[in-house]
Amino acid sequence: MTVTPDLEQVLKGAELRVTRPRVAVLSAVHAHPHADTDSLIRAVRADLGDVSHQAVYDVLRALTSAGLVRRIEPSGSVARYEARVGDNHHHVVCRHCGAIADVDCAVDETPCLTASNDNGFVIDEAEVIYWGTCPACSTSDRHRRRGNT
């Protein structure tokens, strides 16, 4: 594993100690957007060798708490992680294969949705998950046989 100065600086900027597992996990999240924990563990192990599940979970928790990583959890799915943070984007999820893609806000302000009643909250972010069928599933024979479009 090559430790990039950029990732080291990102960790230092968030006041996190630079460790090999933190750099490896952050690198894996950057390389594999919307990856689940098991996929990230495999990617980290490819770089570091043996690293425990718990170590990866702990690093993901620290990175998420520091705002360096965003955790999303679409209904019926395990948690996924991405390094795209702070821009209030949304996601689209395929109902068939679970593929996830980013969707930018249609309006250029945060939040891009206005609540009909904020119940006294100061709202600073909106989280939307769009559901549908990805291009691969919409053209597959399996999907056509089910009668879905």
Image (cartoon, helix red, strand yellow):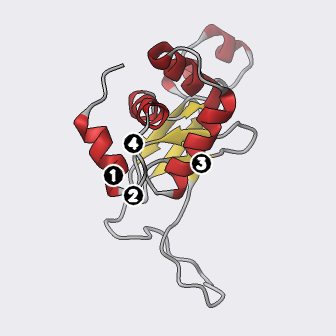
In x, y percent, where is residue 5? 23, 37
Q: CA distance from mark 1 to mark 2?
A: 5 Å
Q: Are marks 4 and 1 in contact (CB under 8 Å)?
A: yes
Q: Residue at x 52, y 14 (%)?
A: 49
**Residue linked to disc 4:** 18
| 93 relative to 31, above or below | below
- Could you tell me residue 63's position as x and y percent? 50, 48
For mark 1, what is the residue? Answer: 12
Q: Amino acid at mark 2?
A: Glu
Q: Could you tell me which residue is drawn at 41 percent across and 34 percent down?
A: 23
Q: Nearer the viewer, mark 3 or mark 2?
A: 2
The reply to whether callout 3 and callout 4 are in contact (CB within 8 Å) is no
Q: Are marks 1 and 2 in contact (CB under 8 Å)?
A: yes
Instruction: Compare residues 78 and 74 and report the one nearer the observer.
Output: 78
Q: First in sequence, mark 4 or 1: give its number.
A: 1
Q: Looking at the picture, does residue 1 appear above or below residue 134?
A: above
Q: Which residue is mark 2?
A: 15
Q: Secondary structure at mark 2?
A: loop
Q: Amino acid at mark 3?
A: Arg
